[in-house]
């Protein structure tokens, strides 16, 4: 199994940006946690983070053309604004899990809308960075069900 782990704007600032919402783990800590978890399960991972919407769309397309088995994505603020990310995931039909470190449903009103959710097989919020691991688990379970 090969998974792409995508992170949107400002996630490179984990541990610095609003630690009351996002915790004190750094982006490097996050990548290490996911890689270790996936390595133990024999899953290949590719990580990508960008503050630019089009770069994230390109990464989703690359996941399709390079035959990834699924995507775990934290679109950051693009969750609430990007029809382009929604369309990219829908276009590729890759199983995708939306992940948010904070419990977005308990935050500001504008964070209550997720465009990308309509194309995802699951959404995980409020588990801190462990939500990414649950996203990996959701993709494993989805692959087992599909086979």
Image: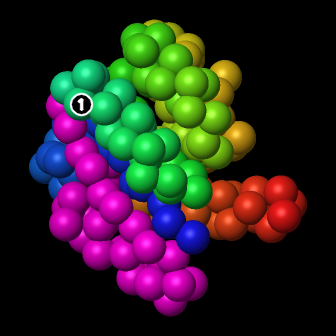
Figure quadrant of the C terminus? bottom right
Q: Which residue is mark 1?
A: 55
Horizontal side, residue 73 vs residue 29: left or right: right
**Between 132 and 14, which is closer to the camera in this rendering?**
132
In reply to whether residue 24 is colored magenta, the answer given is yes
Q: Position of residue 71 (x, y in %)?
A: 51, 49
Instruction: Kindly state the secondary structure of the residue where label 1 is placed.
Output: helix
Q: Quick one: which residue is furthest to the bottom in this view?
A: 40
In the displayed structure, 7 sits above or below 30; it is above
Q: Quadrant of residue 24?
A: bottom left
- In the image, the segment drawn in magenta is 22-51
In the displayed structure, 69 sits above or below 37; it is above
The residue positioned 24% from the left and 30% from the top of the image is 55
In reply to whether residue 60 is colored magenta, the answer given is no
- Neighbor class of circle 1 (other Cα within 10 Å; few <14, some 14-19, many 20+) is some
**Between 143 and 128, which is closer to the camera in this rendering?**
143
In the displayed structure, 1 sits above or below 108; it is below
Horizontal side, residue 98 vs residue 123: left or right: left
């Amino acid at each position: 199994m090969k998974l792409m782990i995508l992170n949107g704007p400002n996630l490179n600032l984990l541990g610095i940006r609003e630690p009351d919402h996002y915790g004190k783990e750094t982006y490097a800590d996050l990548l290490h946690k996911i890689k270790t978890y996936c390595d133990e399960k024999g899953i290949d991972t590719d990580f990508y983070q960008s503050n630019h919407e089009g770069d994230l769309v390109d990464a989703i397309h690359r996941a399709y053309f390079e035959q990834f088995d699924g995507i775990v994505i934290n679109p950051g603020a693009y969750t609430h604004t990007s029809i382009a990310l929604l369309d990219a995931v829908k276009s590729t039909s890759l199983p995708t899990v939306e992940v948010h470190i904070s419990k977005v449903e308990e935050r500001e009103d504008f964070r209550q809308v997720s465009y990308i959710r309509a194309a995802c097989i699951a959404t995980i919020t409020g588990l801190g960075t462990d939500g990414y691991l649950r996203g990996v688990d959701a993709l494993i379970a989805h692959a087992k069900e599909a086979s």
